[in-house]
Amino acid sequence: MVEEFGPYVVVFGVIGAVGYFSWSYWNQIVAIVAPFAEPYRTRLERAAIKTTAADLAFRILTIAVCSWGLFVFAMHPSSVVAVVALPIAFALSFYGFGIWVKTRIAKRLEKFNNQLEIALRLITSGLRAGLGLRQALVVVVSEMPDPIRVEFNRVLSQTSIGVSVYDALDQLNDRMPSQEMLMMTKAIRIQSKTGGNLGRTLEILAETIKQRRRIDRKVRTLTSEARASSWVMSGLPVFVLLIIMVFEPEMRDAMLTTLMGRLMLAASIGLLLLGQYWMSSMSRVEV
């Protein structure tokens, strides 16, 4: 009886203790976490995630405790393993949050780069119509959707408080780093010093970006088979695991309740993730 309800008592006890400690000393926890969260401010801005250090700490804490509770309920580990698993759950939650932010950044950056060609053509049209560079950026903000509208609007806001448009564009390049954005900022800064037809330069740059995007789409088409194969090969072991969990109770119990079964399950998951990462790296080609 004690062994049956022991894990539940431990889980609810730990959740209650963590909840009470967090409620009582939340400001102190935020003060401790804030210096660690500060380096991620730029990454959160790139991902367009509006959050504070307190919200970030609360989310990581909640995910860690909930995932640890699910682990204890499902695996019924010993007390020592349950205690050791708690800091591991915090580490995995922090790492998983980092992966989620990185994915958001990659998607937003890809969307930004896909919009950059049209933005350059709008700037070129504005320059040819007699507008200045800042006025041409206003046209981009009024005509383009997010995320390029938000980022160029931030550039205009910086210029309104005294920052030069060239420095504001350099800061934009730091927030949204890419080869296309770097070429744009360098071209505008060089043209400001040497003179010349900036509209023609940006038009050539827009055409270059268009050709790069065309090559990138062609490469993705050629590597689509390898990427699909990686997902299929990674999904097959998961499918077999689900079949075992449903139709083979003896094998399932041996895998989840014995030490050897848990070690083999952990090793299989590790090798599966390693294989997925390796095949994805092989099919990734930088243009």
Image (tube, rainbow, N blue to C red):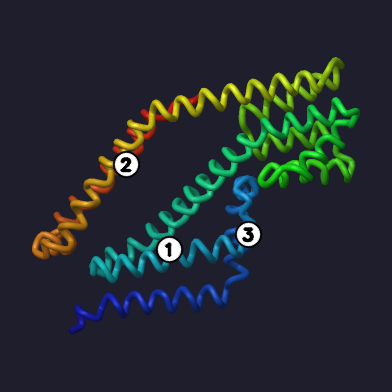
Picture coordinates of residue 281 (x, y %)?
39, 31
Q: Crowding near pointer 2: few (<14 within 10 Å), some, many (20+)?
A: few
Q: Nearer the viewer, residue 276 or 98?
A: 276
x 69%, y 46%: residue: 145
- Residue for badge 3: 51
Label 2 is placed on what type of residue? Trp
Observer able to see residue 217: yes
User: Where's residue 270, x and y in %?
Assistant: 28, 45
Q: Residues within 10 Å of mark 1 (few under 14, many from 20)?
A: many
How many angstroms separate mark 1 from mark 3 (CA)? 18 Å
Residue under pointer 1:
64
- Residue at mark 2 to residue at mark 3: CA–CA distance: 33 Å
Residue at (10, 59) in percent of width and height: 251
Q: Amino acid type of disc 3?
A: Thr
Mark 2 or mark 3, which has the lower sequence index? Answer: 3
Q: Say which label, 1 or 3, has the lower sequence index.
A: 3
Q: Are marks 2 and 1 in contact (CB under 8 Å)?
A: no
- Tell me the tag on residue 6: none
Residue 231 disc label:
2
Give the left or right position of residue 51, taking residue 284 as reference: right
Check disc 3 and report its element: helix, strand or loop: loop
Q: Is residue 254 above or below residue 265?
A: below
Q: Residue 234: image x %, image y %?
A: 28, 43
Q: Nearer the viewer, mark 1 or mark 3?
A: 3
Residue at figure coordinates x 62%, y 35% from the top left: 113
Side (left or right) of 278 relative to 163: left
